[in-house]
Image (cartoon, rainbow, N blue to C red):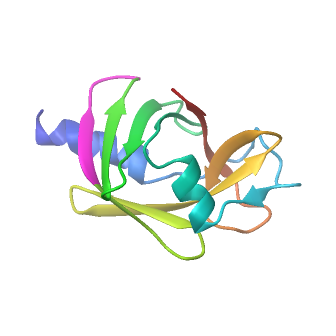
């Protein structure tokens, strides 16, 4: 894959742009801690819908710290690494760029945001494959 496609994918996925309107309200968000993230997300394929860009992507977080990404909205795939802080901040590094998000539950759905602030815009919603 040409480097420019990887960079485009990473800018769309890892830049994590904020959105002005959320599908999930900040009310009643329950942020996931490290143990729950490990139990819920690691080892399972997820499909992420970025609310700002409309991009749909598939992510697989492996227990050994690897992550695989496939853009389902167009060309692009990449691999990298992930790490998880004690407070539940998950960071992904691909092509020398790192992006981080906090995961939360709201009304049975899982989504993420750039911060734990109550009014932080939802960046992406996920479903399990």
Residue 105 versus residue 81 in the image, above or below = above
Residue 129 versus residue 120 in the image, above or below = above
Please state if 123 lies on the left or on the right of 14 as rendered: right
Decide which of 69, 96 is in the foreground and name it: 69
Please state if 105 lies on the left or on the right of 58 as rendered: right
Decide which of 115, 128 is in the foreground and name it: 128
> Residue 81: x, y in percent?
29, 58
Decide which of 14, 105 is in the foreground and name it: 105
Please state if 7 lies on the left or on the right of 92 as rendered: left
Q: Quadrant of residue 58?
A: top left
Magenta region, residue range: 73-80
Q: Quadrant of residue 32?
A: bottom right
> Residue 21: x, y in percent?
75, 43
Q: Quadrant of the N terminus?
A: top left
Q: Please say whether residue 79 is one of the residues in the magenta stretch.
A: yes
> Residue 103: x, y in percent?
62, 56
> Residue 54: x, y in percent?
54, 30
């Amino acid at each position: 894959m040409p480097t420019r496609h990887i960079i485009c994918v990473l800018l769309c996925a890892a830049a994590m742009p904020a959105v002005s309107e959320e599908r999930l309200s900040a009310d009643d968000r329950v942020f996931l801690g490290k143990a729950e993230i490990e139990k819920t997300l690691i080892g399972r394929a997820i499909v992420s819908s970025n609310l700002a860009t409309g991009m749909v992507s598939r992510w697989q977080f492996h227990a050994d710290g690897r992550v695989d990404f496939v853009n389902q909205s167009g060309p692009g795939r990449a691999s990298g690494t992930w790490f998880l802080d004690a407070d539940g901040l998950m960071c992904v590094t691909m092509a020398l760029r790192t992006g981080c998000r906090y995961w939360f539950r709201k009304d049975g759905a899982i989504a993420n945001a750039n911060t734990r602030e109550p009014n932080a815009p939802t960046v992406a919603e996920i479903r399990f494959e």
